[in-house]
Image (cartoon, rainbow, N blue to C red):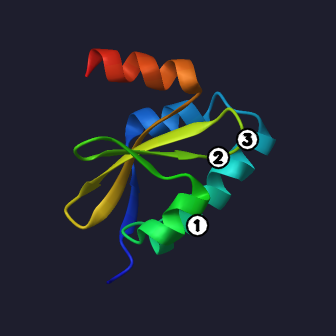
Amino acid sequence: MARPGIFLNPRFSAGLGKLSSAEIERVEAALQVIPDCFGRPHVHSGISIRRLRKNVFECRAGLKLRLLFRENAGALEFFLVGDHEEVRAWLRNC
């Protein structure tokens, strides 16, 4: 399986601007690992990738920080970075 590319949409990029430098480092580390693990269930369970909807996935980047993404045209599109409550709010409104 080919390694999928990564696309950060504007909402995700805006969310990064609200994070501390330590949180940004954790996000960057997760973004490096996710493409190699996505689609390999025994591997991605170790980095906490979970399916939330048919084509919406969550990954943790630390204890509080979560990244939401979807597979889109062979790439992983990251569209939300936030805490548990922000993820729940997005799920209620999608």
Residue 61 spot, x, y in % from top left: 64, 46
In this view, the residue in front, 65 or 17, is: 65
Local crowd at mark 3 within 10 Å, few (<14), some, or many (≥20)?
some
> Split into 4 quadrants, where in the image is the C terminus?
top left
Q: Which of marks 2 and 3 precedes in the sequence?
A: 3
Residue 92 horizontal/vertical position (percent): 32, 16
- Quadrant housing residue 71: bottom left
The numbered disc on residue 23 is 3
Give residue 66's quadrant in the image.
Answer: top right
At x 24%, y 67%, the residue is 74
Asked whether disc 3 touches disc 2, contact meaning CB atoms under 8 Å apart, the reply is: yes
Of tags 3 and 2, which is closer to the observer? 2
Tell me which numbered mark, 1 or 2, is placed earlier along the sequence: 1
Say which residue appears at 80% left-offset and 43% top-offset.
22
Residue 61: mark: 2
Residue topped by disc 1: 32
Q: Residue at (32%, 84%) from the top-left corner?
A: 1
Q: Is residue 46 above or below residue 84?
A: below
Amino acid at the residue labelled 1: Gln
**Callout 2: few (<14), some (14-19), or many (20+) C-alpha neighbours within 10 Å?**
many
Q: CA distance from mark 1 to mark 2?
A: 11 Å
